[in-house]
Image (spheres, rainbow, N blue to C red):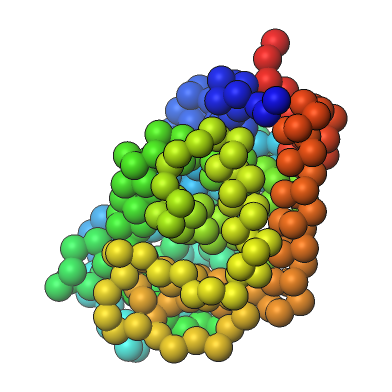
Amino acid sequence: MGLSNTELRYYDSNVLRLPADKRKEYHEQVDRLIDELRKSVKDKTEIKITKVVKAGSFAKYTILRKTSVDPVDVDVVFYISGRDASQETLDSLNDTIYQLLIKVYPTKSVEDFEIQRKAATVTFVGTGLSVDIVPVIEDESRPGYGWQFDIHDGSKLQTCAPCQIKFVRDRKDQDGDFRTLVRLAKKWRNQAELKPLKSFAIELIMAHVLETQGNGGSIEQRFRNFLLYIAQSGLKDQIRFPENTAPFGTFCDPVVILDPVYSLNNVTSRISEAERTEIVAAAEAAWEAANFASAENDNEVWKELFGPRFKTGD
């Protein structure tokens, strides 16, 4: 007998999902940073910030609560106007933000923090929260869209943080357990130490499984379907969505999953062939283990997939 929806929702609510009090604490911490950075930008540079959007897993409500193996981070997108995307560089934008952060926290008077220069990341020691400051040069012709620079190679891609948040919200409207399934998949990923399989890719694979297989069946069955899709497809099939519009890119990467808001961006372009093989093998092994755990009602095997904190009741 497999795990019931009630049992997996209990696990999600009590172990995986970020609690409301922590969400409120993180919101307040990030809001203080945003306010200070806004004031500093206004007073000390010619940069004009037109909008600030909290993005990533935190904004999509797919984030895991913090543990020793599950870090917590928030992406904060600063939309900047008055800059030419063809002339600006990642280094120039991040260096400006880095210098502003140093001025905002000259003596760590607001919060203890560490700053990584390249990614403009602030890590608050007290809560362990990491905040990635993401500068985006606003596209004034398309609300919500802008140009973001890749931290690895400096290339620029179009992005739309509100659109990516809406993408997950729309799937949640189609399937009330979509976010639970994403969190289950992320927890499995962390337990299996599959670092190349990023959270955004997990959300998109889960959305593809929802689109192709529907929302029928139990949560456990659909989680196993997620693993089975990876195992059977080998992640060799290109994934795209109804939101994708032309122009479409041509890719030769081992794994191709199109960014729903920009069809020229393959969000899995950094997964190597060796990493693809590793992810597929891990998914196949996990699918076999999950089937055994379901048939035998064996929580110890589920703990092998999700870690020692797995539980389905008090």
User: Is the C terminus in the top left, top right, bottom left or bottom right quadrant?
Assistant: top right
Q: Is residue 136 above or below residue 72?
A: below
Residue lying at the far top in this picture: please name it.
314
Numbered disc total: 0
Who's the residue at 44% across and 88% down the image? Answer: 250
Say whether residue 200 is visible: no
Q: Is residue 174 above or below residue 196?
A: above
Horizontal and vertical percent position of residue 258: 43, 72
Who's the residue at 77% across and 26% down the image? Answer: 297
Q: Is residue 80 above or below residue 89?
A: above
Horizontal and vertical percent position of residue 182: 54, 45
Q: Looking at the rendering, which quadrant does residue 278 occupy? A: bottom right
Horizontal and vertical percent position of residue 90: 47, 78
Say whether residue 229 is visible: yes
Q: Is residue 31 above or below residue 43?
A: above
Q: Nearer the viewer, residue 131 or 168?
A: 168
Q: Looking at the rendering, which quadrant does residue 291 occupy? A: top right
